[in-house]
Image (tube, rainbow, N blue to C red):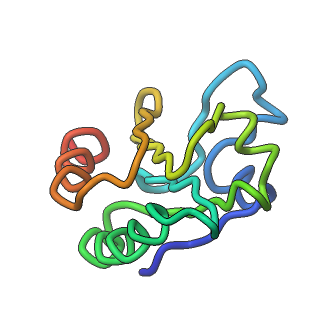
Amino acid sequence: MATVSLNKADFLKKVANYETNPNEWKFLGERPALIDFHATWCGPCKALGPVLEELSEEYKDQIDIYKIDIDEEYELSELYGIRSVPTLIFVPMQGMPQMAQGALPKPTLKKAIEEVLLP
């Protein structure tokens, strides 16, 4: 499975419906997720893209990897306080999401996936 681009409507269905649950985090996914907030003009984002594609293949039946373009989905970026790109949000099945900033190297991402998403 390749990474999947999300717009607001998809986010509300697949990740969290903050319109119906504005005060509570309720993850709607079927598997843990890694969300990449990125921009087309961002060099580190472009470097991270192929790494996320590789990880989506390696973990294809275990996690979902989503990409959100901050310029197209400004409301989502504002809602989650995205101030720089790339910003990654690790969303486990239970508990609160965790955020990381920057184009992390693949070994660091794999460690985070194993520890946060697939403990």
Left or right of residue 83, residue 99 in this image: left
Front residue of 38/10: it is 38
Q: What residue sits 19% from the left and 48% below the top?
A: 114
Residue 92, given in percent of the width and then of the height, sits at: 39, 41
Residue 96, given in percent of the width and then of the height, sits at: 46, 27
Residue 48, compared with residue 99, is above or below; it is below
Q: What residue sits 58% from the left and 53% below the top?
A: 37
How many discs appear? 0
Res. 9 image quadrant? bottom right
Left or right of residue 22, residue 31 in this image: left
Res. 7 image quadrant? bottom right
Q: What residue sits 44% from the left and 53% below the top?
A: 34
Left or right of residue 113, residue 69 in this image: right
Residue 80, compared with residue 52, is above or below; it is above
Residue 74, given in percent of the width and then of the height, sits at: 80, 48
Q: Assign the N terminus to one quadrant of the image.
A: bottom left
Hey, which residue is sitting farthest top in the picture? 23
Front residue of 101/90: it is 101
Q: Assign the C terminus to one quadrant of the image.
A: top left
Res. 117 image quadrant? top left
Residue 66, given in percent of the width and then of the height, sits at: 53, 62
Q: What residue sits 30% from the left and 70% below the top?
A: 55
